[in-house]
Image: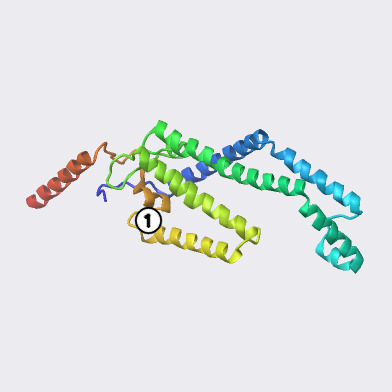
Amino acid sequence: MYQDLQKASLWKRISAYIFDVILLVTVSVGVAFLLSALFRYDSYAQKRAELRQAYEQEYGVTFDIAQEDYEKLSEAERKKIDDAYAKFSSDVQVRGTDSMIVNLSLIILVFGLLIPFVGLEVLVPMAFGHGRTLGKKIFGVAIMRTDGVKISNFQLFARSILGKYTLETMLPVFLLLLLLLNILPVVALFGLAVLLFVQVAVLMFSRQHGPIHDAIAGTVAVDFASQMIFDTPEAALEYTKKLHAEKAERAGYN
């Protein structure tokens, strides 16, 4: 670990993080709308609504009924609704439309977040240098390796895409979806608990007390104005040797 470490203050890191999250969410919503229009998502949703309405009119029922109202119906009325919904669910067109809606939803979710992550968390920092997103640039925060050397493009990719996007964003999102849809809820809840535990453990017990994405990439958030960031490990080593020599010289005078 680099000895002369000038970590960015907590308020700077939090401010930069909040700014970047707001920007990322805003861009993600815009990208999701564009992808939705590109893949004609609304047309499939409209087609499903029309098919549902056709079955409701054919059988003289409504599928949009509260559970308590459903239980108040007679056995014959409940059977009528159940039979109609069974026919609706098994319809080839309905199943095909549902499959497209699910697939497009996943595509829009994955790429609606991936594209902004690549742009704002990889390409922008590559342009600004030193791993700085727009928020980090505004608030004077930079990212460097723990040995004081500037972050490489590979580390930036690992930090942003493997760490932030995959482990800290998409994995929790998918686990939450499984939980909300009641698909393997125990597994989803356990997975979320494990992720939270690992994140807290890394923040508390790692040498840099940073999040998972910094632990994966071997990086640390520093104050850009006061931190010396070296181009090579050799330059960082020479500077460290110089500091030790100066310290030894001062101790000798004492």
Which of 130 and 103 lies nearest the eye of the viewer?
103
Which of 92 and 170 lies nearest the eye of the viewer?
92
| Quadrant housing residue 183 | bottom right
- Residue sticking out furthest to the left: 252
Q: Residues within 10 Å of mark 1 (few under 14, many from 20)?
A: some
| Left or right side of 48 for 206 | left
| Left or right side of 114 for 128 | left
| Left or right side of 240 for 93 | right
**Residue 188: where, in percent of width, then height?**
56, 61
Q: How is the image coloured?
A: rainbow
Residue at 27% over, 46% down? 147
Question: Is 208 situated above or below 144?
Answer: below
Question: Is 245 situated above or below 231?
Answer: below
**Residue 116: where, in percent of width, then height?**
53, 38
- Residue sticking out furthest to the front: 92
| Quadrant housing residue 161 | top left
Q: Name the amino acid type tagged 1.
A: His
Residue at 87% over, 51% down? 56
Residue at 43% over, 40% down? 136
**Residue 91: where, in percent of width, then height?**
78, 50
Answer whether residue 14 is visible to the viewer in this image: no
**Residue 191: where, in percent of width, then height?**
52, 62
Question: Is 75 situated above or below 247?
Answer: below
Q: Which residue is mark 1?
A: 209
